[in-house]
Image (tube, coloured by chain):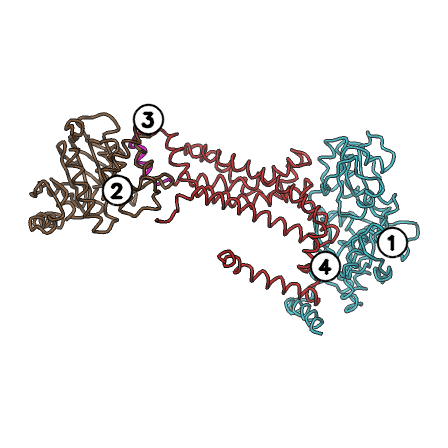
Amino acid sequence: MKTLRAILPPLIPFVAITATMEFLVREGFIRSYLLPAPSAVFLAIWNNGSELAQAMLKTSAAALIGFALSTLTGIAAAVLLSSSRWVQKAFYPYAVFFQTVPVIAIAPLLVIWFGYGMQTVIASAFVVSIFPVIANTLSGILSTDPALRDLFRLYGATPSMTLFKLRFPAALPQIFTGLRVAAGLAVIGAIVGEFIGGGGLGSVVDIARTQQRVDKVFAAVLLASLLGLALFGLINLISRITLHSWHASEQ
Amino acid sequence: MLRRAFLKTTPLLGFLASCGKSAKIRLALDWKPEPEFGGFYAAPFDKHSLEVEILPGGAGTPTVQMIGAGSAEFGIVAGDELVVARSKGNNVVALFAVYQDSPLGIMAHASRNLSSIGDVFKGGAVALQQGLPFAALLERKYGFGRVRVVPSPNGDITAFLNDEMFAQQCYITSEPLAARKKGVAVKTFPVSDTGFDPYSTVLATSDDTLRKNPAMVKSMVAAVREGWRAYLDDPKPVNEKMHQMNPSMDADTFAEVAEVQKPFIEGAPNTELGAMTKPRWDTLIGQLKDLGYIPAAIPAEECFRLL
Amino acid sequence: MNAAAHAGVALRLEGVRRVFDGTLGKPFAVIAGMDLRIEAGEFLAVLGPSGCGKSTLLRMIARLDEPDGGRIVRDPDGDRAQTAFVFQDAHLLPWRNVLDNAALPLELLGVAHAQRRDAALAALGQVNLIEAVDRYPAQLSGGMRMRVSLARALVTEPRLLLLDEPFAALDEITRFHLDVQLRELWRARGMTVIFVTHSISEAAFLANRAVVMSRRGGAIKLDRTIALPNERTNELRADPRLGQEMKLLLDAIEE
C-alpha cells in the first residue's frame, strides 16, 4: 500500500502524457517520422531486445568503470588539493577545465589517444564525470565545522588525523552529492564516447538515426535514461545506508 | 478533418511568426560550405526574385527531417535517404541532383596493394557510417567477420594516417586529397563500382511546398542551375566566399576539390546539370527494398520532379 | 578522591592584547591589555555584552589563539590533556555513537582502546548517560547532546575546563539541571573552571567569582567574589541573596 502511494503520483503524469502522445501520433497531429508513438518505441524495444540488452550492458560497463575511476581519482585529487592553499590555487583551475571542456569536442581526441574500443568510452565517461566529484569533495573537506577543527587542535591531532577522523567523514554528505551528479554525467560521457568510438547504446542511436528509424532512436535513448536513473538510484541507496546514523530519528 | 485543420494551422502560425519581414526561403546544407555546394552559393537568387538563406550544416545535420518539419523549405539530401524518408511518410521530393554519381568511397593505404573493394574487409579496421545503405550492402556482399568496423570519423584522417591497416569511408573528392597532402599514398575504391550509385547532393523540397508554390520552386531550380554553371566555369570567387565561412579547409584544397569533383557533377557526356532519370531511381528503390531499408517499393516518379 | 590528581591550574594573564582587522581594514584591539589572576580550582564566570571579547579571551587561554601582546602563564604547564573546551553547541561527530564521541579526546591523544572505553564510560556515568552509549547524536535531545559534550570534555580528567556559553541553546529547565550537575562535577574534581556566559543568573548561581568585561577593549569593570554558599542547589534559585548578586552584576554591565 505504501509503495503504491509512492509510485502513484509520478505514474499518473506518465500515463497521461504517454496516452496523449499515442493519440496525437495515431491521429496524425504529430508526424511519426519526427516523433514516434510510444507504442512504436516499446515495440522497437521488444523487437530488438537482445541487441538493445547487449548494447545496454556495454554502455553500463563503460559508464560504471568510468564512474568508479572518477570517484577514486576525484576524491584523491580533492584530498590532495585540500592539503594547502597554494596547491589549491595552483591546480584547481585545471580541475575546472574538466568541467568546461565540451566532451563532444574532445571525444575525437580521446579516440586518437586511446584508439577505438571500450577504453575510449571509459575515458569519455571519466572526463565528463570527474569534476563534480572533485568540486563537491573539496568543498566538503574545506567546510568542516570550525569548532570541531578547534577541538581536534586542542588535543594536538596531526593533520592526517584531522583529515581521516574529521574532515573526510564530515564531507561524506557532500561527496555523495557530487557522486549523484557524476553518475548521470558518466552515462552521458559514455554515450558520447560511443558516438565517436563505437559500441553500446551510443552506437545504436547513431546507426538508427542514420537509418531514419526514430522509434529505435527513442528506444535506445529511453534505455540510456533508465541506465542513468538506475545509477543515480544506486548512489542514493549507498548514501542512505552510509549516512544512516546521521539522520536516524529520535527513538 | 480536425487533423487537416491542425496541420493547416501550424504553417499559418509559422507564417504569422515571420510576418513583418519578407518570407525568407531557407536552404539547409548537410555539411559545411565546401565545393560540393559551390553552385548554391553562386546561384543568382536575386535575379529570380528569391530571398534565400543558406544554412550551413555539419556532422549529422538532419536535412530530411528539417524539410519534413518545415524548418527549411529546401535541403540537400542523398538520393537513398530521400527514398527511405518517403517510405516513412516524410514526403520529400528531389529537384536537382548536383552529383550524378555518388562520390562515396573507401580509401586505404596504397602500400597494402589491395586490388578491389572487397579486399578492404579481409583484415585491419574500416571506419563506416553503419546506418547507411551502402554499408549494409558492403556487409552483405563481403561480410564483416574479419575486419573491425568502427564509426566514421566524419572527415578526420588522423587515425587513417597513423595506422596502415586502417581504411575509412570517404568522399572521393575530399579525404584522399588530404591524405596525399600529408604524404600518404592512398588507393580509393568508389562505392558506385558495386552498382550502388544514388544521386548525391540533391536539392529537395517537400511535396507540400511544391504543390503550394510551384512557381517559386521552379525559380529556385532555375537559379540553382545557373549557379552551378557559373561555379563550374569559374569557382574562384565563390571558393573564396566559402573559405571565409569554413576556414578549416585551406584555399588550395578548395581549388583542388572543385577541380576533382567536376566529373561527378558533369556525369556522362551531354547530361544536363542536375538531371535525373526514372531508371536510376527505379534501380535505387529496388536496391533499398532488397537491403531491407524500405518495406515495399515506392513509385519512382514520386521521388523526383524535373522543373 | 586524590586531590592532587584533580587539582586545577592557576593562570596569570599579563598585559594580554588581541588585535583584529576591523570591517574597513582598520585594526582594532578586542582586548587591549588585560591583567587577570585566576587561582587553581576557581570557578570563574566571565560576563559581558556581545563583542566584548570574552570568547576571544577563552580561546587564548585554550591556546587556540595567540595573543598579539603580553603573555598567559599557566601553573602547572605542560600536557595537552589538561585543557578541555565545551562549545556553545555540542558539536558531536554525527557518524559516531555516544561512547565514541566521548572517547574522542583520548583517541586523539593515542590512548589504547580498552583504556579510553573505560574512561569514556566513567565520564558518561558522571553525566548520567550510560543508557545512551550506543545511540547516535541524531537520536538525542539537545540537553543529552550537551551532556555528551561535557562527558567528552571530562574524559581526559582536565585541570582546566573552559566553557563558552554551553547551555545557551537549551531550555531553562534543562539548563537549571545542567548547572547543578556542572557545579557538582567541579566540586568533586577540583579543576579550574572558566565559564563564559550571557546569563547573569547563571553566572551568579554557578561561580565563586565573576568578572564583568567592558563593552570594548576587554577592560574589567567588576571583579567580584560571589557571596553564596559553596553548595548550590536549585533551592538557591529562590534565595534573595542570589537576586542581590545578580543586581550587582547587572549594574556593572549596564553602567
Asked if the stretch drawn in magenta spans residue A149, the answer is: yes
- At label 1, the amino acid type is Gly
Cβ–Cβ under 8 Å for marks 4 and 2: no
Distance Cα–Cα, label 1 vs label 3: 85 Å
Q: CA distance from mark 3 to mark 4?
A: 73 Å
Is C92 contained in the magenta span?
no
User: In the image, what residue occupies the spot 81% across and 56% down?
Assistant: B295
Q: Amino acid at mark 3?
A: Ala
Separation of marks 2 and 3 at Cα, in angstroms? 24 Å
Q: Amino acid at mark 2?
A: Arg
The x, y position of residue B186, in whole percent, is: 81, 34
Q: Is residue A72 above or below residue B245?
A: above
Query: Looking at the colours in the rendered structure, which chain would you say is drawn in red?
Result: A
Q: Which residue is mark 1?
A: B286
Q: Nearer the viewer, mark 1 or mark 2?
A: 2
Q: Pointer 2: what residue?
A: C147
Identify the residue under disc 4: A33
Q: Are both tags, 1 and 2, on one chain? A: no
Helix or strand or loop: what does disc 2 sit on? helix
Residue on which disc 3 sits: C112
Q: Which residues are magenta?
A: A144-155
Residue C242: percent from the left, percent from the top? 9, 48
Q: Residues within 10 Å of mark 3 (few under 14, many from 20)?
A: few
Position of the N terminus of chain C by quadrant: top left
